[in-house]
Amino acid sequence: MQLTHRSLVYARANQSRFLAELEEFVSFPSVSAQPERANDLKRCAEWLAKHLRGLGLDQVRVIQTRGHPLVYAEWRHAPQRPTMLVYGHYDVQPPDPLDAWMSPPFEPIVRGNDLYSRGASDDKGQMFVHLKALEAYLKTDGVLPVNVKCLFEGEEEIGSPNLMSFLASNKRTLSADFAVVSDMPIPSPVRPAITYALRGALSAEMDITGPQHDLHSGIFGGAVHNPLEALCGILAGLAGTDGRVSIPGFYDCVREGTAAERRYMAQFGPTDEQILQNAAAKEPWGEFGYSLYERSTLRPALSINGISGGYSGVGGKAVIPCRASAKVSFRLVPDQDPHEIDCLFRRHVAALTPPTVCAKIRTNFGANPVVIDIAHPPIRAAAVSYQKGFGAPPVFLRSGGSIPIVNTFEKTLAIPTVLMGFALPNDGMHTPNEKFHLPNFYRGITTSIWLLSELALQQGIKHGANNTSGRDLPQGL
């Protein structure tokens, strides 16, 4: 259609400016987990709102929460056309360890075909793709082929503690026919993918306390239980060397993958060698009987994300620390419930804790696993758009990551979500030297432009054509 042609020409002509704007966006150190960065998140939200106004969107607002702000915008001038809700997050992970970065994490730099910066791919770069597609339409014709609402949050990386209540209180404002989220990788620059399943998550912190203060290890070593040693013993009791979680009842509700799905995963998913290469790891590890792709998507997992306690400075210190702590997270699969797993985890830790120390657990957040029915019309539109934007049809993949908002969209707004990513497996999400492959950035904009066009042509999108239970995958997957 002619409108799409003009939009594509505009997008190609403005690539250098789009990149400069993205560089400005990722330069904000919007780390939601660090309280001292609160003003940086506020400034980033205000910058984003100003940018949305410049695109030509309406009702642009920075919405204060008990934590970091939400940013909302809309364009609703396409009667009888479907409404798309674009979701993204402008907060980022902490950049630590800083000495592992080749360049400062919030001073974006282009090296080769990649933009390096914290947040470049997770999620500022990927959400920016859709904003530039909206701009391409609005600046060439002044209208969009569908209605659009945008919701961007600043707390996704800490579990979205204020977003759920906002959604529940603003159902009418946020009503849509489907949502689009771009916060995940695709296999390669020439192989796009639509994600149809996400693992759930449970994040917790465990504190082990012993004596009232640190002790001399020479005087008291062997007489007083060291909380750091007790913590290590508890952590060792959470999982076996075979990769299986040792918590009683942990696997009771795990839904096994069907033979047909596992065949599809083996045919179209990444190989063990590719996963090891992306991880820069030499040897595989994990649960017997499953490929690495299955282990990291179809099966649940436990991760110890951090341990602290005692002295970690230069040289040695003969000390028994009075406390030690660990950050622990679980990745969950259908039909595991985060609340039930939390109860099992607490019960098991209590059983493992010796009487010489005390254990206290704080649950940070939980997220339910998600399986999406890929027969939804907007997902079919996304598949056509990928074909036009990347020159190749997408594959359908499971993701080992968690995006809590997807389940909330289904339960609270009763809408399906299209999960279409533009990052690469080696883009370094959550790690030093995070990057965004710029050819994917530009192809992503083209794909998003086509998506807007295809959505206007697809039948059965408005008001939802299918349920979103996702329990049964369509034939052929």
Image (cartoon, rainbow, N blue to C red):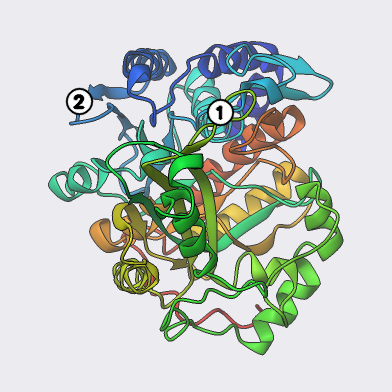
Binning the other alpha carbons within 10 Å of mark 2 as few (below 14), some (14 to 19) or many (20 upward) gives: few
Say which residue appears at 53% left-offset and 48% top-offset: 305
Classify 90 as above or below 424: above
**Residue 84's disc number:** none
- Could you tell me residue 202's position as x and y percent? 40, 59
Quadrant location of the N terminus in the rendered image = top right
Classify 344 as above or below 318: below
Classify 233 as above or below 384: below
Query: Visible in this render: residue 347?
Result: yes
**Residue placed under numbered mark 1 in the picture:** 119
- Could you tell me residue 307's position as x and y percent? 50, 45
> How much space separates mark 1 and mark 2, taking CA atoms?
22 Å
Q: Of residues 323 and 404, which is closer to you in this image?
A: 323
- Could you tell me residue 178's position as x and y percent? 38, 54
Amino acid carrying label 2: it is Gln
* Residue 120 figure quarter: top right
Q: Of residues 303 and 72, which is closer to you in this image?
A: 303
- Could you tell me residue 238's position as x and y percent? 49, 69
Q: Of residues 62 and 250, which is closer to you in this image?
A: 250
**Residue placed under numbered mark 2 in the picture:** 64
Q: From this viewpoint, which residue is outermost toward the front?
A: 219
Say which residue appears at 53% left-offset and 54% top-offset: 304
Amino acid carrying label 1: it is Gly
Binning the other alpha carbons within 10 Å of mark 1 as few (below 14), some (14 to 19) or many (20 upward) gives: many
For the residue labelled by badge 2, is the local secondary structure a helix, a strand or a loop?
loop
* Residue 274 figure quarter: bottom right
User: Taking 226 as reference, is 187 left or right?
Assistant: right
Quadrant location of the C terminus in the rendered image = bottom right
For the residue labelled by badge 1, is the local secondary structure a helix, a strand or a loop?
loop
User: Taking 222 as reference, is 433 left or right?
Assistant: right
Q: How many labels does the image show?
A: 2
